[in-house]
Amino acid sequence: MMLTTHVPAVQALLAAALGEGRSQRLCQQLELPVGLPAAGPGRSSRAELATALTVALFGDVQDRVPLAAEYVADLQRAGRKLVLDHGALRTVAAPCGALPAGDAAFRRLLEPLGFEVVGVYPLPKLGMTGRAYAHRDLPEGIAQFFVSELHPERFSAPFQAAVQRVVGHSRDPLSASCAELLDALQRDGSLPLAAAARLLLGLVSCFDRQHDEPTIADYERLLEESPEMAWIATEGNAYNHATDRVACVETTAAEQRRLGRPIKDRVEVSSSGRVRQTAFRAGLVRRGFRSEGGREERLVPGSFHEFISRAALPAGGLDLSFDSGNATAIFAMTGVPGS
């Protein structure tokens, strides 16, 4: 494969999957990676397809998180582009009907795209485990995925029963044709451009809620013990947050606070001191619930936008690691206000 300093295949993939106008807007908002391995004319490498997926999911967060869209608009007015560091999603490590349990539901997508697990992060206070997936071909340039899974067995029996009622009959969004394309991608490292665009659309559909609306009773039961599981009940496997890699989190946080935006009171600092993070509080979204009266809607926490600064390792290169303490604090951004 050859290396490119531009991203025509990424733009072509996004245009085919999302439309020309949306593709152009997203590519203007993001600093796309330089040096992506390319597969040649008429084909998409795994790195190009992986990048296109992260761009599409970033766009989805903007659609669902008004604060993220406002922040990106600020950058656009200032003539700056956002550097996408990572996106996060949540899963449940329990039987989920047709959907593979926990991390496995996304490992089967991410590994053919060229991602590999580079860190496992216990989150004992949350009853969860996080896994960081970095790209083999361009780890500093292609946004990572932080996939967490919740362990219901660490909670009460009534909680576990509610989890099964909520996710136990989940659908598998990955079609047989997309699974075949993933196999071909894993084998060959690239796909014809038209096939890659079809796969991109199929992959985006996997980052959504795959189960039915929960009941009010089950949602409240989950919320008592785990705001994270309650969030999964309404949002499923959607991008929980997207993260801008900034030069100085403290400066960024101070500016957002000056603008009156609901950002964390403190910056989280990793045990190494090299990774610093903060985030907006998740905005409230209206979601439906099944109830004795039929159906009703409530405002619940949705997704959010995060900021991160990464210092260099002593041996060189950015510190791309995560930190369990940082992650635990950032996860609190989807808690119910006042709880």
Image (spheres, helix red, strand yellow):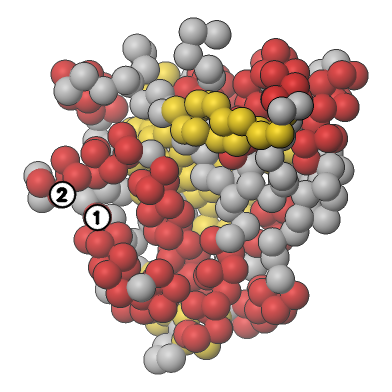
x 87%, y 27%: residue = 161
Of labels 1 and 2, earlier in sequence is 1
Amino acid type assigned to the residue bearing label 1 in the image: Gln
Position of 190 with respect to 10 (left or right) is: right
Q: Which residue lies furthest to the top in this view?
A: 338
Q: Name the residue under label 2.
A: 76
Circle 1 SS class: helix
Q: Nearer the viewer, residue 292 or 217?
A: 292
Q: Residue at x 31, y 34 (%)?
A: 67
> Is residue 161 visible in the rendered structure shown here?
yes
Check the image and name the residue furthest to the bottom. 41
- Mark 1 lies on residue: 29
Disc 2 marks which amino acid?
Gln
Q: In the rendering, at what x and y percent does residue 211 appear?
A: 72, 46
The answer to whether 53 is drawn above or below residue 214 in the figure is: below
Report the residue at 53% width, 69% height from top.
201
Q: Is residue 136 above or below residue 163?
A: below
Q: Could you say which is closer to the camera, residue 46 or residue 253? A: 253
Q: Nearer the viewer, residue 309 or 306?
A: 306
